[in-house]
Amino acid sequence: GEDVEQSLFLSVREGDSSVINCTYTDSSSTYLYWYKQEPGAGLQLLTYIFSNMDMKQDQRLTVLLNKKDKHLSLRIADTQTGDSAIYFCAETRNQGGKLIFGQGTELSVKP
Amino acid sequence: DAGVIQSPRHEVTEMGQEVTLRCKPISGHNSLFWYRQTMMRGLELLIYFNNNVPIDDSGMPEDRFSAKMPNASFSTLKIQPSEPRDSAVYFCASSLQAGSETQYFGPGTRLLVL
């Protein structure tokens, strides 16, 4: 079956690193995504990783993929108050365009 | 470049009324997706189109929901008759093609059915 799970809340202090975790069940997932949703707005693609990669870094963002454990994480370095949002993990496979989303993790950054 | 455009941004209607949500995908994108977001159920895919053809509508909740894509630059999601439980944010997204391509989301339509 298809299932993507995330913890619902994370609270960090400004300047600390944030790590948002995601687990998925479909071993045939080929692409895994992180989307950000700010209050009252649509989803914004942050980054994505192919399933044959272990890590991808993009400025303050680091994505780690453990394919054996079907675990994906997003690390935000030097977290800022502007990073406060809901972060969605999503996965897809080659066939079809269906994205399976997690429930979203609400990140709260305290000054 | 303009992103995905949705209208209206907000809609308040009474139970039983017909609601039509509109979406203009990014020019050149061949795939279009309709999602619904609620607190209870999170983000759900309702239907998606590839080259204007509906590919997977298994997420459409009931016959009251219908979606069309008459051409590559326009799609509608219609609810008739609407019910209070349809209240949600409805997102449209588009991608170059279905499969592994990144989806770009519109700002959403906030629907409230009284």
Image: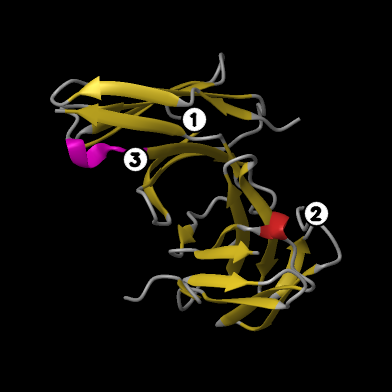
The percent coordinates of residue B99 (x first, y second) are 61, 53
Q: Which residues are magenta?
A: A81-85
* Labels 3 and 1: the sequence-earlier one: 1
Looking at the image, which is closer to me, B70 or A64? B70
Q: Is residue A4 above or below residue A94?
A: above
Inspect the image, locate mark 2, and give the three-letter code of the amino acid beneath it. Ser
The percent coordinates of residue A64 (x first, y second) are 38, 23
Main SS type for the magenta part? Answer: helix
Q: Which mark is residue A52?
A: 1
Q: Which residue is mark 3?
A: A85
Mark 3 vs 1: CB contact within 8 A: no
Does label 1 lie on the same chain as label 3?
A: yes
Q: Is residue B15 above or below residue A93?
A: below
A86 horizontally vs B87: left or right: left
Q: Is residue B16 above or below residue A8?
A: below
Looking at the image, which is closer to me, A23 or A31? A23
**Which residue is rendered at x = 67% and y = 29% of the image?**
A26
The percent coordinates of residue B34 (x first, y second) are 62, 62
Does label 2 lie on the same chain as label 3?
A: no
Q: So how many labels did they put on this image? A: 3
Inspect the image, locate mark 3, and give the three-letter code of the amino acid beneath it. Ala
| Alpha carbons under labels 3 and 1: distance apart | 28 Å
The chain to which mark 2 is attached is: B
Quarter of the image with the C terminus of chain A in it: top left
**Which residue is rendered at x = 80% and y = 54% of the image?**
B58
Question: Residue A76 lies in magenta, yes or no?
Answer: no
Q: Does dot 2 land on a helix, a strand or a loop?
A: loop
Inspect the image, locate mark 1, and give the three-letter code of the amino acid beneath it. Asn
Q: Which residue is mark 2?
A: B58
Q: Does dot 1 land on a helix, a strand or a loop?
A: loop
